[in-house]
Image (cartoon, coloured by chain):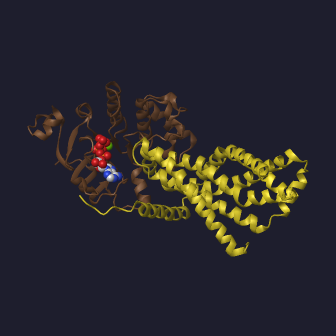
Amino acid sequence: MKTRDAVIEVENLCVVFGDHVVLDQFSLNLYAGENLVVLGKSGSGKSVLIKCIIGLLRPDAGRIRVLGQNILDLDVHALDQVRAQVGFLFQSNALYDSMTVRENLEFPLRRHWLQVTQKEVDQMVYEVLESVGLEDTTHMMPAELSGGMRKRIALARTLILKPAIILYDEPTTGLDTITALEIIELIKQVQLRYRTSALVISHDMKLAQTAAERIAVLIDGKCYATGTYAELKASTDPNLRAYFD
Amino acid sequence: MLRPKKNLLLSEIGDFTRFVVRFFREAVRPRYEMQELIHQCFVIGYKSFSLVGLTAFIMGLVLTMQLRPSMVHYGVEAEIPAMVGIAIIREIGPVITALIFAGKIGSSIGAELGSMRVTEQIDAMEVSGTNPFKYLVVTRTLAATFMLPVLVVLADGIALYGSFLGVNIYEVLNFRLFYTQVIDNLAYYDVLPAFAKTFFFGFAVGIVGCYKGYYSTKGTEGVGRSANSAVVMSSVLIFILDLLAVQITELIWHTR
Ligand SMILES: Nc1ncnc2c1ncn2[C@@H]1O[C@H](COP(=O)(O)OP(=O)(O)OP(=O)(O)O)[C@@H](O)[C@H]1O
Ligand SMILES: [Mg+2]
């Protein structure tokens, strides 16, 4: 076992919808500073997993600790404080349609009751837009942006609170290969620049190969295997081979 | 697999009731979203004003023209203002305005929240330190509750003006005289219950729109269905509430 601190600890997580068992005794740790990619095929419960981690879904059993806090026991106020340190990039971006890019970016700042002056806000908005390379879009509406741009703005919005952890829900799905590569590059840059730990949910092998320091494979609701890309690729297990061939 | 079929209507009523209870619980607890509430009042009022005004005007005009032959037949055409006044203030103003409101605002709330649900915007709000129920549902429902009465008062005024023009097609009647006849014939039990029920109509439109949108199912088809069923359900509710209102009014004032 490594001696690095775990920022997210998921233990024996179970999630059941009706009689459909989505997660079954799922356990996984995310260590400080690492990029961890969770692979799983569509419908395997990847989104359910990270929605549990951020407290959007309540699991039927199990324990989740985020930055040392047991999030299943927290009240709304304490949960918000944890959430302010965790960025979440949604699968569908979740940009607010009725707001401009700038208002989208300011929303989390204003809502988390942060004491910031307008000047600081302007500075922060500029900084995150610069990190994603879209400085001149502040007055545009989300509907006017392309898919890749929307993904970048959504990433900028999660960055604006300088989170310690970022959860990415399929950041490259629905993008063309070139844009997907740009996003992967961006994820790596963000990790270097903001020193975040990242949990990336995906079924994109390219992403796993280039951005992951460690990979976990989600099969049948369990954490089936973990390891580096090279380790898993060398495995002879037929369930894993299905991903790597 | 055989399972007892769930009663859809009953479970819908149960879910809706739970939603309404949650509304009241969340509405009284602080943090109050005043800024968003004021913004929504403005948006809702602004969006529906011209449509409500236009329909009210036509309604007043047409009602007067349709009534006229019968009134002339019985030789009571002088009573037209009084009669139209009662009809508009007590029933037609509130109900028609509420129905237009349901079509315009109920559907737009349903579609807006529905698309926010399916594109995860509601989840995004929740992780951004915002209670989406307060921020979206409470503000929109309260705005609809407060704005419909205002719109109904405006609509009543415009409809009466339409009616005045309708009378003037056939005879010359002084505007002042017309209004005096309308007002003199109205008792407080004509005006008060009619005004009071518009709050309930507005509440019904707002809460149903939010309910349908908030629990919208995945996919753009789900959004369309939310908007559509919001209008149907709130229109039916308006008629049911109207029926209740007239019963209660009779009980209190014995207007029969
Ligand atoms: N709120 C819910 N109610 C009932 N079932 C749900 C709910 N959310 C998810 N599920 C079910 O859980 C399973 C996993 O869903 P999830 O969204 O986590 O998949 P995913 O791994 O993210 O897939 P994708 O790659 O397509 O996003 C699916 O079978 C889905 O039908
Ligand atoms: Mg998913």
Is residue B147 visible in the rendered structure shown here?
Answer: no
Where is residue A67 shown, x and y percent of the image? Answer: 33, 52
Colour of chain B in the image: yellow
Query: Where is B187 relative to A18, above or below?
Result: below
Name the quarter where the N terminus of chain B is drawn: bottom left
Q: Position of residue A95 (x, y in %)?
A: 46, 40
Q: Is residue B113 left or right of residue B82?
A: left
Q: What is the number of callouts on the image?
A: 0
Residue at 27 percent of width and 56 percent of height: A16
- Left or right: B142 as drawn, with respect to A198: right
Tell me if I can see residue A45 in this picture: yes
> Residue A70 falls in which quadrant of the image?
bottom left
Return the residue nearer the eye: A21 or B187: B187
Question: Horizontal placement of B148 versus A224: left or right?
Answer: right
Residue B52 percent coordinates (x, y): 68, 47
> Looking at the image, which residue sits at the far left?
A236
Q: In front here: B255 or A12? A: B255
Q: Position of residue B210 (x, y in %)?
A: 51, 53
Nearer the observer, A78 or A117: A78
Q: Nearer the viewer, residue A161 or A202?
A: A202
Residue occupying the far top of the picture: A178
> Given the current orientation, which residue lies at the most extreme front position?
B73
Q: Residue at x 39, y 53 (%)?
A: A82
At horizontal 67% and vertical 75% (from top left) the residue drawn is B251
Which picture quadrant has residue B77?
bottom right
Q: Colour of chain A?
A: brown
Which quadrant of the figure contains the C terminus of chain B? Answer: bottom right
Q: Tell me what residue is drawn at x 40 percent, y 42 percent.
A: B219
